[in-house]
Image (tube, helix red, strand yellow):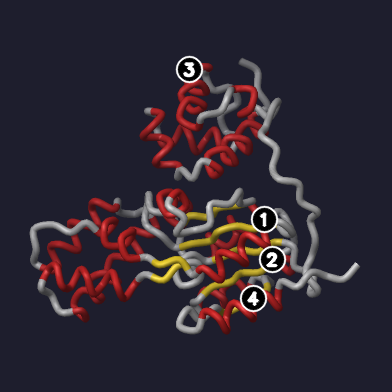
Amino acid sequence: MAMDEKSLGKQLQAARQAAGLTQQQLCQQANLSFSTLTKIERGAIKSPSIFTVQAITGVLGVSIDELMGAHSPARPQRQLQKTKTGIGFIYFDVNGCLVHFYQRAFAQLAEATGAPSDVVETAFWHYNDDVCRGIITLDEFNAKLADRLGVESVDWRKYYLGTIEPIQQMHEVAQWASERYKIGLLTNIPPGLLSPMRQNGAVPNLQYDAVIDSSEIGAIKPEPHIYEVAQAQAGCPPEEILLIDDSRANLMAAEKLGWRVLWFDDARPEESTARVREALEPRKA
């Protein structure tokens, strides 16, 4: 089956992201190895078998022609613009920017386990970086957290998804921005959580131009590698990229690479959203 491997890789990645699936989830559902999928997405496999392609399209719900770009579903027409300061690509952080979650999740976990809240938070942050890098699975994270809290089991996915609250003002901004600029998600997050968040509306389920999931990249903000991947996916000069994030450290790392940055204070969402809207004001014709 003759294919343009780079074109296939880009089409596959776009179709997977549009379906709200991580690489791990697609591999599990299509019964593929993780290495095979990643090689196809980056163009290292020149001619995947027809059976592999059929397995992928079956999960994604697209035809082979659509995956190859012959009949790609049309994205809503956008007249791409730049902001008054020359920004053309906006990356949104997830936790603390598009959703609130930490304190309610910690409080519920503390109540369920009988552990003090500060012990729960300390245990969580002890392992959070490793699970967000994909070094350990979510199941392994749960086991380590349970062991540290002295309980039989913990289901962090349940606490996380059950307590996150959309920051509705920012959802509206993301929708508005998606109609004018290229947009993406750039998030530190454990494997397999971003997809259900998009599906249940906790995160705007838009057709993002790039989705940078730390557990897939194998790096977390503020490590340089995740920004390098995000910049490559954005496909524009660093000075045209804006990162909206609630972490000063994450913003400083982006700024060192020449990105524009904007701090979001999720304790004051109305005030922060107003700053975002002002920053995204389109350039006058």
Element at label 2: strand
Residue under numbered circle 2: 241
Judged from this view, the residue extending furthest toward the right is 285
Across and down, in percent, residue 37 comes to 48, 34
Looking at the rendering, which quadrant does residue 12 occupy? top right
Cα separation, mark 3 vs mark 1, equals 31 Å
The reply to whether dot 3 and dot 4 touch (C-beta < 8 Å) is no
Camera-nearest label, 4 or 1: 4
**Which callout, 1 or 2, points at the residue further toward the start of the chain?**
1
Residue under numbered circle 1: 234
Q: From the image, which quarter does the C terminus lie in?
A: bottom right
The reply to whether dot 2 and dot 4 touch (C-beta < 8 Å) is no
The reply to whether dot 1 and dot 2 touch (C-beta < 8 Å) is yes
Residue under numbered circle 4: 276
Q: Residue at x 15, y 72 (%)?
A: 111
Element at label 1: helix
**Which callout, 4 or 1, points at the residue further toward the start of the chain?**
1
Across and down, in percent, residue 148 comes to 14, 67
Cα separation, mark 4 vs mark 1, equals 19 Å
Cα separation, mark 2 vs mark 3, equals 39 Å
Cα separation, mark 1 vs mark 2, equals 8 Å
Vertical arrangement, residue 231 with respect to residue 268, above or below: above
Residue under numbered circle 3: 51
**Which callout, 2 or 4, points at the residue further toward the start of the chain?**
2
